[in-house]
Each structure stands twice: as C-alpha cells, then as structure tokens.
Image (spheres, grey):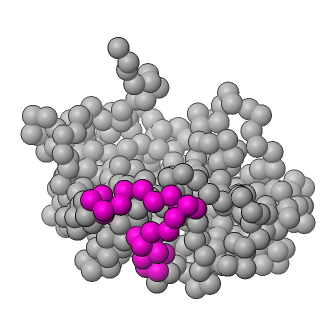
Amino acid sequence: MATLSPLLKQATPVLAERGEGAYLYDAEGRRYLDFTAGIGVTSTGHCHPRVVEAAREQAGTLIHGQYTTVMHRPLLRLTEALGEVLPDGLDSLFYLNSGSEAVEAAIRLARHATGRQNIVVFHGSFHGRTMGAAALTTAGTKFRAGIGPLMPGAAVAPFPQSYRYGWDEDEATRFALRELDYVLATTSAPADTAAFVVEPVLGEGGYVPAPPAFLEGLRERADRHGILLVMDEVQTGVGRTGRFWGHEHAAVRPDVLITAKGLASGFPLSAIAAPTAVMERARPGSQGGTYGGNAVACAAALATLEVVRDEGLVANAERQGARLNDGLRKVAADHPVIGDVRGLGLMQASEFTAPDGEPDAATAARAHRAASDRGLLLLTCGAFGNVVRMIPPLIVDGAQVDAALELWAAAVADAV
C-alpha cells in the first residue's frame, strides 16, 4: 500500500472535506476559520462562485492548450487583464506553474538580460525549494541543507529586521543598505551582479515588511550599477498587503515582478513580468514548459482578478488588516511573551520571545495548536519557528476578524 511521504507533516490535524469563503469543514461537519488560505493562495476564499463557474465552464471546452504549441483565449484575456494592474512598463509576461518555477525563470532572465552571473538576496528570504531558488533562500537551513553544492553566484545581504536587531526602522534600514554596499564592495562586484531579488514582506522569514526606504535604496543602487531589481511578489501580490502589489507601499518600480499564490484562487499558476526590452533578451528555448498557462488555471485567474476588482478586495485587505493588527496588539499587551506584532494588510504575525530575549518556539507552537483546537487555523514561520502568522482570504469581513481575535486571545492564554 502506498502512503504519503513521511516528510509531509500537516500544520493542523484537519481533514478538509469542503471549503466555503473563509471556512473549512471536516468530515464531521466541524467548521474552522481558515486564516492560512492555503499559504496565501485562496485569495478570494474557498470556492468563490465566480471562480468555480469560470473553471467549470473552461473545463468543459478546453482543459489544456499547451501554449508553445497552440494559443488559447483564456491566456490572452488574462495577459490583457494583468496588463491593467502591473506596474508601468512591465508589459511582457511568461507563465509557469509555481512560485519556485517563476523564481528560476526570473534568475535565468536576469542573467541573460545583463550578461552577469551573481544574484543578491536578503537574510530571511524564501524563494523556493528547487535548486536555484533554494540557493537564494535563507529563511532556514531546512530548505537547503544536505543538497549542496547549491547554485553558485548567490550573495546574501542583511534585511532590515528591526525587532531582531533591537533597533528602530530607520537605523535597521541604514544598516542594511550600508551592508549591501559592503557586499557589493567585497563579495559581488556590481559589474558581476545581475539582480537584487527581494520580497516586499519576508514570508517564511517571519512576516517582516520591508521599510519603504529600504526598497527605495535598492532601486537607487540598482539604477546606479545597472542591476535588475526583482520583486518576489509570490505571497504579497494580488492585494494581500492592502495594495495590489506589495512593493507599492514604497516609491519603487521593479524591473521584474514574480507572482503566483493568490493569482488564481488555488489553481496552480505563476508568472514573471518584465519590460519587453528585458524579456526579449532571454535566449531562445529558455522559456517554456508543459503546463504553464493552463487554460483552466488562466480562466480561474481571470475570474480572480475580476472578483478582486469588483468586490473591492484590495481596500478590504487594508481595512481588515488594520483591524487585525490592532486586535493582535491588544492580545500582545496582555501577554508579554508576544514580543512583536507586525505585518501589512492581511499578512500579520505575532513573534513569541522568552524573557531573556531568545525566540520562544515552544510557546508559539502551543498557541498555534490551541488555536487549531478552538477552530482557528494558523501557520508558523521564522527561522526559529517562533512566529505565528495570519493569512486570511481577502474576502474576510470584520465579524470574522473579530471572531479570529477572540479565538487567538483564548489560544494564547491556553499556551502561556
């Protein structure tokens, strides 16, 4: 008898039978408030009727039209729709299946377009588990241990994690940019550096927003040295942070943008976007794939973008994110073990810290488990596993946020 790999550990004990909106239901009919959203994937909630209907209709006409063999209309319509929300100048798209694949494509494009080999990433980054993406991932050794040698040419600079360093945001930003200059002077010469790859909010690294001044500093250095600025918006894109793209909290425009997770409400689809002048420098044969741009996934993505627009979900993410952050801070005020609350929009996190300042993963794990027992599904993250994150769907309402906060307060009380 075959079984799943023993390495596939569930974050919660739930065997999901069905999903609806912000809720999952198990076989016994118990309802769970899902503040994981499939790790930020079910952006319009579980089984949004418009997404379901779009996928159902497309599956009845054309399931797969391999897009280097034939073209299909869902792909063309999606490209047109994304053109309306992408940053100015990013007018060329390449579709894939997953975030890791899109990161790999962005690395390849950056090296081709610049003729340079090195990629600079930032401490706490998560860009995927495939070999190139893993070389760029520093959110934890578990993502890269035991598989070396990894792809050469990756250099790591500090990310301005204010809470970790014990500084204010301005000081952390100055330090990170100064150390980036030091990396360029000692490790990866600008003339050898193809790209900076950065998340607007660290994901697996602990839900740490990048200060706007930091992203603006990256843009200035990229322009000065002819380096491409690549925004990994796999988790932050499509409204998650209260802006359509996470980098829009700063006055920057990326040269390459990576999107995935929330793009198609649960169907596997990712993409990279770049100016045509950059994209056309990719070498022949370097872009392709069997399943990228699948017709059903494209139809679901098109419906997702329409729902995000028509239901005002970007503004809702900003509004409900502020409500959630405020409530999390009130819980933290009652429990000193929560040392920091942070996030943008509907990416919010509570970091657990022991009295001596060390990460408190044990209490975080107890709170996470207690929340699940009470009917609230959450995830942990951070290098030490001491950060509990909340990623509700963009359709979440105020009553659901308040219900989650009530459950979270009880879960933390259970854990301490």
Which residue reaches farthest top?
Answer: 1
Q: Which quadrant is home to the C terminus?
A: top left
Q: Position of residue 77 (x, y in %)?
A: 42, 76
Q: Quadrant of residue 140?
A: top right
Question: Which image quadrant for residue 371?
Answer: top left
Image coordinates for residue 340, horizontal then vertical, percent = 44, 54
- Residue at point 23%, 34% (across, down): 15
Residue under the image location 40 percent in, 62 percent down: 295
Q: Is residue 182 placed above or below 138 in the rendered structure?
A: below
Q: Is residue 183 visible?
A: no
Q: Nearer the viewer, residue 258 or 397?
A: 258
- Residue 146, given in percent of the width and then of the height, sits at 67, 27
> Is residue 47 in sight in this rendering?
yes
Q: Is residue 208 rendered magenta in the image?
A: no
Q: Quadrant of residue 224?
A: bottom right
Horizontal side of residue 27 vs 139, given as left or right: left
Q: Which of these two is toward me, 241 or 339?
A: 241
Residue 71 within the segment the image draws in magenta: yes
Q: Residue visible at 71% across and 58% down?
A: 286
Nearer to the camera, 376 or 196:
196
- Image position of 23 (left or right of 40): left
Please provide the residue range marked out in magenta.
58-82
Q: Residue at x 63, y 61 (%)?
A: 198
